[in-house]
């Protein structure tokens, strides 16, 4: 397998990927976000769909209920193992370990490419999206969800502030910790999104505010946050902060967000759609 994104490969095949793969329940609110994504991609019953950065396959499985055939592609072996287990009953979804930036997907094979939070991690996003485009038939649809800027994302500001031991004021928190580059927020600027989609036509960017679910209780949510994402990096980075203290701080910060449905924080996403024109848009 050709891998160009070696840092991401290491992260997603290491502790980050293992934590995701071991995650028990998944976010009930994802149904809403996934439905929005699949509606935007206009997935129909005969469509061949590529799910980029499919992770444990939550979007691939939903797509498979609407589509003819789904290929979930991801860098992470542990997450794909979980994806294959969870999709065992579905006959029209397969998974492949691949770096979507450079993987030689069959040209013109797919009617649609989708991604939920799986396209922010490319070292060369323009090359990656062009590679994904080549896998689409001319006129094929691209639809993906990425986070809006960190200061708009309460799910980022609140836990990060708790670990930094500061007030959850968005600008202060983001100035203190902008997130590990080049990931998570690399496509949070719509101008940047349009740049990296230079080879596509009809680019549209819609703001969504779908809440994000983190666990059934603050303790479970804190556990998940310490195993993944910016909060995991912060814990690793701060030698003076014990896991126990970090867990206690997160529980206290998340308590106000706990309700009957679990711990849910406000989210802010961009829903992006575009059409592949065989690369003509770039010429
Ligand atoms: C935040 S997770 C999202 C997973 C999944 N889409 C979901 O919604 O649960 C990001 C995923 O992108 C994958 N990823 C990152 N860079 C990638 C690349 N270059 N090619 C393929 N997958 C990639 C990671 O391995 C990880 O599974």
Image (cartoon, helix red, strand yellow):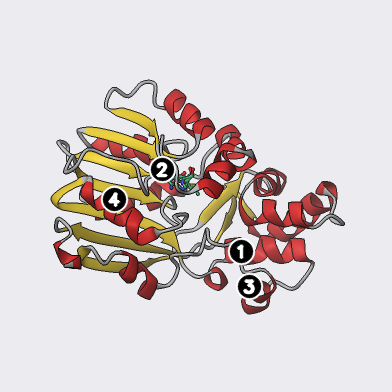
Between marks 1 and 2 in the image, the one whose residue lies nearer the viewer: 2
Q: Are marks 2 and 4 in contact (CB under 8 Å)?
A: no
In the image, 84 versus 90, the foreground residue is 84
Between marks 4 and 3 in the image, the one whose residue lies nearer the viewer: 4
At numbered mark 2, what does the secondary structure look like: helix, strand or loop?
loop
Q: Are marks 3 and 1 in contact (CB under 8 Å)?
A: yes
The numbered mark at residue 131 is: 4
Among numbered discs 2 and 4, the one appearing first in the sequence? 2
The numbered mark at residue 59 is: none
Between marks 3 and 1 in the image, the one whose residue lies nearer the viewer: 1
Q: Residue at x 46, y 57 (%)?
A: 123
Q: Which residue is mark 2?
A: 99
Q: Which residue is mark 1?
A: 179
**Whole-percent x and y of residue 38?**
28, 48
Q: Disc 3 versus disc 1: distance between alpha carbons? A: 8 Å
Taking 270 as reference, is 233 left or right?
Answer: right
Q: Disc 1 versus disc 4: distance between alpha carbons? A: 27 Å
Among numbered discs 2 and 3, the one appearing first in the sequence? 2
């Amino acid at each position: 397998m050709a891998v160009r994104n070696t840092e991401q490969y290491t992260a997603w095949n290491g502790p980050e990927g293992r934590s995701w793969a071991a995650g028990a329940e998944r976010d009930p609110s994802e149904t809403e976000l996934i439905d929005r994504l699949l509606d935007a991609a206009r997935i129909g019953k005969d469509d061949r769909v590529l799910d980029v950065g499919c992770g444990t396959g939550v979007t691939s499985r939903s797509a498979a209920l609407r589509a003819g055939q789904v290929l979930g592609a991801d860098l992470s072996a542990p997450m794909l193992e979980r994806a294959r287990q969870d999709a065992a009953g579905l006959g029209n979804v397969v998974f492949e370990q691949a770096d979507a930036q450079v993987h030689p997907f069959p040209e013109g094979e797919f009617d649609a490419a989708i991604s939920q939070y799986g396209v922010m991690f490319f070292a060369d996003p323009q090359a990656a999206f062009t590679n994904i485009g080549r896998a689409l038939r001319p006129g094929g649809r691209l639809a993906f969800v990425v986070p809006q800027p960190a200061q708009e994302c309460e799910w980022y500001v609140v836990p990060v502030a708790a670990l930094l031991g500061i007030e959850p004021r968005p600008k202060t928190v983001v100035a203190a910790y902008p997130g590990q580059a080049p990931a998570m927020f690399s496509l949070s600027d719509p101008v940047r999104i349009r740049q990296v989609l230079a080879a596509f036509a009809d680019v549209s960017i819609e703001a969504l505010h779908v809440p994000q679910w983190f666990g059934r209780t603050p303790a479970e949510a804190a556990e998940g946050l310490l195993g993944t994402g910016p909060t995991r990096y912060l814990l690793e980075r701060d030698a003076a902060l014990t896991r126990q203290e970090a867990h206690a701080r997160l529980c206290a910060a998340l308590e106000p967000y706990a309700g009957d449905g679990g711990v849910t924080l406000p989210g802010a996403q961009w829903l992006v759609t575009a059409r592949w024109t065989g690369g003509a848009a770039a010429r």
